[in-house]
Amino acid sequence: MGAVAVISLGEIVKYAALWMLSHKEHLHFGRDDLALTFAFAATALAIGEITRLLGIGGGIQGMIPQFLLQIAGKV
């Protein structure tokens, strides 16, 4: 678990440095990355709801508790 935290912290530092340097050059790295992150999340939620409607998944109601359990390390 500690290794994952260290790698994540390194990614955050790298992302912040890249964002500051690209912002200085008037590049839109941060905005583009944020837009793609939101698009990914929206797609994941839409697919989850489609699987619920088809009766082969739990939908958002099944995803959120599973996600919270994974964060807490109980799965």
Image (cartoon, grey):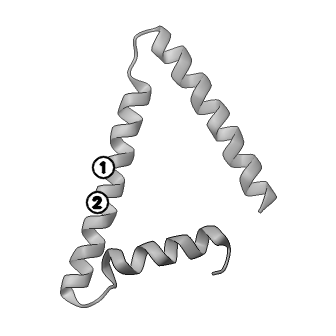
The residue beneath circle 2 is 43
Give the residue at x 45% y 8%. Answer: 25
Give x and y (percent) for residue 33.
41, 36
Give x and y (percent) for residue 71.
61, 67
Q: Amino acid at mark 1?
A: Ala
- The circle on residue 9 is none
Where on the picture, by quarter, is residue 28?
A: top left
Give the residue at x 58% y 32%. Answer: 15
Residue contact at pointers 2 and 1, CB within 8 angstroms: yes
Name above or below for residue 40 compared with residue 54: above
Secondary structure of the residue carrying tag 2 is helix
Give x and y (percent) for residue 17.
61, 23
Give x and y (percent) for residue 58.
34, 84
- Horizontal arrangement in the rendering, residue 12 relative to residue 67 (left or right): right
Give the residue at x 77% y 63%. Answer: 1
- Work out how far the residue at label 2 is from the one at label 1, CA to CA, in angstroms: 6 Å
- Horizontal arrangement in the rendering, residue 58 relative to residue 66 (left or right): left
Secondary structure of the residue carrying tag 1 is helix
The residue beneath circle 1 is 39
